[in-house]
Image: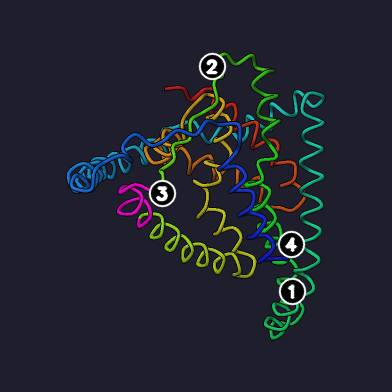
Amino acid sequence: MSFGGSCILTGIGALAYKFDRNQQFERLPESDVLLNKMNTDVYRKKLQQLKIRIPRSLINYFKDFFDGTSHLYPIKGVIEVTANVKLYSVPMLTIFTSYSIMYSLVSIAYWATITPMYTAGLLFLGPPGLAIAIIHTFLHTNALTLMFMRMSHLQSALVKRTVTFKNYQSVSKTKPIKFYVPILTNYFWFYYLPKKILKYTSGLFVFLGLMGVCSIPVIGPFLYTLAISPFISRIYVSNIYRLRGMTNKQRYDNFLDHLGKYTVFGIYAGVLELLPVISGLALTTNSVGATLWGMDDEE
C-alpha cells in the first residue's frame, strides 16, 4: 500500500480526471491525414514546431522564473483562506479528512514494511540513525500520500467556490474540449501511438528514478518535490483552466511555453506541503492560490 497502492490510486485518479465527463470530446483535426502525406503534414510539421518551441521555452523559462509573480500565489492562497475561513471551511475539512485517512493507511503499511529496512540500514549510526529513519518515514509517507491527493482532484469543488466568490466572469459556458485520435487512422498508428509508447516508457523510467531520489533518507523528499515542482503546478492550475474553456492542447502548450512560472509556483506550493498534517491544509490553500493565479493569468 505504501508505494504500490499510492501509485495505483494515483493512476486511477489521473484516468478519472483525464476522461472526466465535464468536457466534450472532439476528433483532433489533423488526425485525418492521408498516409502519403504523413511526412509533410505531420513529421516535418512537428519537427518545425519543435525547433521553434525549444528556444522559445528556454527564453521564457528564465524570464518567467526570475521576473514572474507566480511564486506569490501559494502565499495568496494562504491569505485568502485565512481571511475567509467560513467560506472554505467545508471543502477544506473534506480535503483534510481525505488526506488524513490516506496518510494513515500509507503510514501503517510503510511502518510495517519499509521503516524496519531503513532502521536496520542505519543502525550503525546508533540513536541518530533511528531518528533519521523515523523522520524519513514521516516525510516519505507524506510524499506518497500527496501523489494521490493531488491527482484525485478533490479540490474541484473548492475551485468552483473560489471562482463564484470572486465573481470571476471568464468562466466558459461550454464544456472544455478534449481532442482525441481515432484508432482507425494513419495518424494514430504512425505517429500518435509510437509517440505515446515513447512518452510513457521514458516517463516510467523517470518516475522510478524520482522514487529512488525520494527514498534517500530525509533529503530525498525535498529533492523529489523540487524535481516535480512544474507538474505540481500543472495539476493544481488545470481546474481553473478547464473552467476558462481551455482545451487540453492549449493547457499543454501553456505549460511548455511558461515552464518557469509552473516551476516557481510548484516550488513554493511544494514547500508548504513538505510537512505531514500541514500539507493536508496546504492542499486547500494551494488549490485556492492556483485558482487565483489562473484567474489573473489571462493572456
Q: Nearer the viewer, mark 3 or mark 1?
A: 3
* Mark 1 and mark 2: Cα distance apart in space: 49 Å
Specify the quadrant that holds the C terminus. top left
Which label sits on residue 170?
Answer: 2
Q: Secondary structure at mark 4?
A: helix
Instruction: Look at the numbered discs 1 and 2 and tell me whether their residues touch, using CB distance below 8 Å.
Output: no
Q: Amino acid at mark 2?
A: Ser
Marks 3, 2: nearer the viewer: 3
Residue 125: say if magenta. no
The kind of residue on which mark 3 rests is Ile
The quarter holding residue 281 reads top right
Q: Which residues are magenta?
A: 183-194
Q: Is 91 on the left or on the right of 198, as rendered? A: right
To which residue does mark 4 refer?
Answer: 138
Contact, CB < 8 Å: mark 4 with mark 1? no
Q: Amino acid at mark 4?
A: Phe
Q: CA distance from mark 2 to mark 4?
A: 41 Å
For label 1, the residue is 115
Tell me the distance, in whole angstroms, between the alpha carbons under discs 4 and 1.
10 Å
Q: With 280 as the anchor, is 46 left or right in this view?
A: left
- Which of marks 4 and 2 precedes in the sequence? 4
The residue pinned by badge 3 equals: 183
Structural distance between the alpha carbons of marks 4 and 3? 45 Å
163, above or below 254, in the image: above
Tag nearer the camera, 1 or 2: 2
Kindly check if marks 4 and 3 are in contact, taking CB atoms under 8 A apart as contact: no
Q: Secondary structure at mark 3?
A: loop
Q: Alpha-carbon distance for marks 3 and 1? A: 46 Å
Residue 280 coordinates in the image, percent (x, y): 74, 45
Q: Quadrant of the N terminus?
A: bottom right
Q: Secondary structure at mark 2?
A: loop
